[in-house]
Image (cartoon, rainbow, N blue to C red):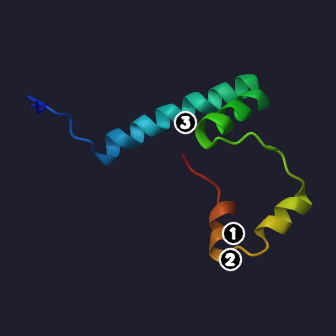
Amino acid sequence: MTATYLKKAAKTPETESAGARKVVAEMLEEIERRGESAVREYAQKLDHWTGEILVSAAEAERRTRTLPASTKRDIEAPVKL
């Protein structure tokens, strides 16, 4: 049996952006409230990451040494919301 939709909402960049902003705002509030434990939970939930969260400056330098300059600029650019 095939589903038939009488009405279906259209996804637009505006509606998708608003939804993403809401999710991010909630995540940031949770991180501000609970700190590192919230970060660890999000890392595990979203990325299945359970390793170290904080890395030393030397480790960050070692891991980013071979990145293209354009990627480094993208990472360093401030995010405007």
Q: Are marks 1 and 2 in contact (CB under 8 Å)?
A: yes
Q: Residue at x 50, y 32 (%)?
A: 23
Q: Which residue is mark 2?
A: 69
Q: Position of residue 16 (x, y in %)?
A: 36, 41
Q: Position of residue 25 (x, y in %)?
A: 56, 32
Q: CA distance from mark 2 to mark 3?
A: 28 Å
Q: Nearer the viewer, residue 78 or 47?
A: 47
Q: Residue at x 28, y 45 (%)?
A: 12
Type of the residue with mark 1 = Lys
Q: Which residue is mark 3?
A: 24
Type of the residue with mark 3 = Val
Q: Residues within 10 Å of mark 2 (few under 14, many from 20)?
A: few
Asked if residue 68 lies left or right of residue 2, the reply is right
Q: Which residue is mark 1?
A: 72
Instruction: Examine the image and state in which quarter residue 19 appears.
Output: top left
**SS label for mark 1:** helix
**SS label for mark 2:** helix
Q: CA distance from mark 1 to mark 2?
A: 5 Å
